[in-house]
Image (tube, grey):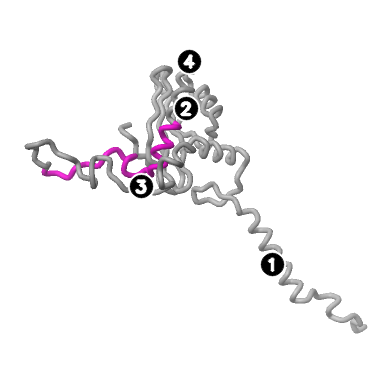
Amino acid sequence: MTPIAAPISAFARPRRALAAVALAALALTGCGNNGSNGRGSATRSTPEQAAFAVMLDKVAQPCSSSVGSASGPAGADPTGPEGKQSLAPGETPPAEPIEPGAPTEAQLSERDRCASVQHEQRIIQALQAVSEPTPAKVRKSLNSLGYIDERIHGLKQDGKVTRFYLDLREKGGRLCEAGTAAGEETDVTPCVAPATGSFAVKKLLSDGT
């Protein structure tokens, strides 16, 4: 057998070169996961999602100067000073613990509660103009306001009205809206979604709905 005359380096890649290739592969793998939808999953943000985030910021803009906290539950209980419910003269305290107010008061941040009012006003105004609000018409109207399909849930016909939910969670908030499209009687109320994870209608805490 004729001995190999060429040096080993001509057939085998040096260890330093192999290490450089491995590091480059890891860097390329990481580049695909630098986006996030704000709900725990690392995915690349689409132009539609980016436009939705801009809309949320714009709607909540009036709330920035009126509240100090962007996330987390409000510190004060609206029932009265120091969180205690006042009693009328001569009235005795109840034997059972006083139930807290609506879930939105206890579990939504001040910013979310303020933003919910802004969302409700614009949604109600738009849906009141929709005659015979079918799910298709309601979806189209919500889309025109900037609410994307992946944030619209439970859209269904219920008699002459259409019910729906909007997932408006952002920046650690828990805001969602429960809506009923019914022409002039359209109603939208805030609800509380889980802080993390997927949006499930059955897990919502609603404001009397």
Q: Residue at x 44, y 41 (%)?
A: 65
Residue at mark 4: 131
In the image, which is nearer the foreground, mark 1 or mark 3?
Answer: 3
Q: Callout 4: helix, strand or loop?
A: loop
**In terms of sequence position, does the residue under pointer 1 or pointer 3 come before the other?**
1
For the N terminus, the image quarter is bottom right
Disc 4 to disc 3, how far (Cα)?
Answer: 38 Å
Residue at mark 1: 23
Q: Vertically, is 155 above or below 33?
A: above
Q: Residue at x 34, y 46 (%)?
A: 74
Disc 2 to disc 4, how far (Cα)?
Answer: 17 Å
Determine whether, in the image, residue 9 is placed left or right of residue 67: right
Question: In which quarter of the view is residue 31 placed?
Answer: bottom right
Q: Callout 1: helix, strand or loop?
A: helix
Task: Tell me residue 57's x, y (percent).
Answer: 52, 39
Task: Tell me residue 164's x, y (percent).
Answer: 44, 30
**In terms of sequence position, does the residue under pointer 1 or pointer 2 come before the other?**
1
Disc 2 to disc 3, how far (Cα)?
Answer: 25 Å
The one nearer the camera, 95 or 69, is 69
Which portion, as a residue range, is magenta?
95-119
Residue 122, which numbered label? 2
Residue 73, which numbered label? 3
For the C terminus, the image quarter is top left
